[in-house]
Image: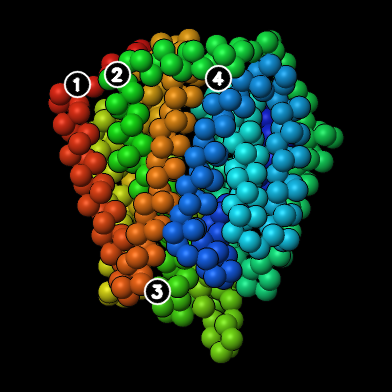
């Protein structure tokens, strides 16, 4: 076996930037539903902003990757920061619905520009001897940032929402300094394709009707409920579950220090868990992803994906059950959803790259962003609005039961699709 090539300094610089960006991004996004309620906006209004935000975040990378190939990663990274920083600071000033919506769209634009750049850097500076380890490290950095961002932002917003926004802005400012001072453009041939050719290639890929239907299915049965989880989980925990009891649950297992870090003292002097601190999957993925990947790495993609969907459905049901039973059930629900996510998501995205000819792997992954965008664009206007409706009926848990049924129907549709159209053939190389 060949000796593993050492990672160059830019690899570690890029991963440091990724931690900070995910810290800022998820620090803002995970608590955004709570923030909109704090300002008095309806769940329908929140859903509109969430849908537009996610759609922009995941469609822009299809374009921004082309600019990075043409002009270089460093220049486009700096452009993303120059869009990010003032947009986050605007959240401190603007309170109108239109102002917040436009500000969040600006943040989505910045995030979309940024999204393919660090993974692109990792791809460029790794080779056959270290690429698996390299992307494993990158994935861990994503989850470290995504785990600590909501925790820190949650603690700060309990004091003042402006403190949370300033913390995110500081993270972006540090990223800018690191990039200017330490990020060295990886050596590679920079030429890139024109946007016109990029769109033509995407059209050619989508002209394969079987593949296009597959992407739409992914958007509707997987990415839609997945984004609904991230849209709703923090506000559901914070507003609909017994956060005093959840604080005591964590205290009994992990001790007062951890429980206090994840909580705040309310107006009555009671300690309550902050909804954002547990309402994501990053901390579970960091612990279990390697184990889950090892278990399923040699199993067929579609059965693995369907199994992940089923576990996610169990997670949704358990999250809803927490409202009508004991709030502590939510911990199991989140864990089940996380296991379903880390089973289904990496495997189906890997599957898309391996059904493409080697020279078109990047193109096919670009079309995958469109599937993610479909799910994101529908998640807010469908499920956040539905959550608001059920909450007015005093049954917010119903939204999770609807999502459970949604995923079960999705499993049935995927089984019908593979039976009628057949699975795609994964290439050997």
Q: Secondary structure at mark 4?
A: loop
- Indicate the position of residue 201 as horizontal and vertical percent values: 48, 13
Determine which quarter of the picture holds residue 295.
top left
Whole-angstrom CA distance, mark 3 to mark 2, is 44 Å
Q: Which residue is mark 3?
A: 241
Q: Which residue is mark 4?
A: 129
Q: Which residue is mark 1?
A: 421
When the figure is inspected, residue 232 is found, relative to residue 107, above or below; the finding is below
- CA gap between label 1 and label 2 equals 10 Å
Q: Secondary structure at mark 3?
A: loop
Q: Earlier in the sequence, mark 2 or mark 4?
A: 4
Reading the image, the residue beneath label 2 is: 209
Q: Name the colouring of the figure.
A: rainbow
Using the image, determine if residue 197 lies above or below residue 4.
Answer: above
Whether residues under marks 1 and 3 lie with C-beta atoms below 8 angstroms apart, the answer is no
* Outermost residue, bottom side: 268
Q: Which mark is residue 16?
A: none
């Amino acid at each position: 076996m060949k000796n593993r090539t050492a990672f160059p300094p830019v690899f570690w610089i890029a991963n440091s930037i990724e931690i900070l960006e995910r810290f800022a991004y998820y620090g803002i996004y995970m608590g955004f539903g709570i923030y909109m309620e704090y300002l008095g906006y309806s769940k329908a209004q929140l859903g509109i902003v969430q849908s537009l935000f996610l759609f922009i975040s995941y469609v822009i990378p299809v374009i921004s990757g082309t600019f990075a190939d043409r002009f270089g990663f460093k220049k486009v990274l700096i452009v993303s920061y120059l869009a990010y920083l003032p947009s986050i600071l605007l959240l401190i000033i603007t309170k109108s619905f239109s102002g917040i919506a436009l500000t969040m769209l600006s943040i989505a634009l910045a995030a979309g520009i940024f999204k393919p750049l660090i993974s692109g850097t990792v791809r460029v500076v790794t080779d056959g001897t270290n690429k698996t380890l390299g992307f494993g490290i990158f994935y861990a950095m994503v989850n470290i940032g995504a785990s600590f961002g909501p925790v820190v932002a949650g603690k700060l917003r309990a004091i003042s929402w402006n403190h949370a926004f300033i913390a995110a802005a500081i993270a972006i400012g540090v990223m800018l300094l690191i990039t200017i001072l330490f990020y060295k453009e990886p050596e590679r041939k920079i030429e890139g394709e024109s946007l016109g050719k990029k769109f033509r290639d995407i059209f050619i890929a989508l002209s394969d009707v079987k593949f296009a239907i597959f992407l739409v299915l992914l958007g509707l049965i997987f990415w839609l409920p997945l984004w609904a989880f991230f849209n709703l989980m923090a506000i559901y925990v914070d507003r609909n579950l017994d956060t005093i009891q959840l604080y005591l649950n964590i205290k009994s297992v992990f001790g007062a220090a951890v429980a206090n870090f994840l909580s705040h003292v309310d107006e009555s002097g009671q300690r309550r868990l902050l909804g954002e601190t547990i309402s994501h999957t990053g901390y579970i993925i960091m612990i279990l992803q390697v184990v889950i990947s090892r278990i399923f790495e040699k199993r067929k993609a579609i059965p693995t994906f369907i199994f992940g969907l089923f576990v996610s459905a169990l997670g949704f049901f358990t999250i809803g059950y927490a409202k009508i039973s004991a709030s502590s059930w939510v911990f199991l629900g989140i864990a089940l959803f996380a296991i379903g996510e880390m089973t289904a998501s990496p495997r189906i995205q890997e599957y898309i790259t391996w059904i493409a000819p080697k020279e078109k792997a990047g193109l096919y992954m670009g079309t995958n962003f469109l599937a993610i965008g479909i799910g994101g664009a529908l998640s807010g206007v469908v499920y956040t609005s539905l959550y608001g409706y059920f909450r007015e009926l005093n049954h917010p848990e119903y939204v999770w039961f609807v999502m459970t049924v949604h995923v079960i129907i999705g499993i049935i549709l995927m089984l019908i699709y593979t039976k009628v159209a057949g699975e795609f053939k994964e290439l050997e190389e």
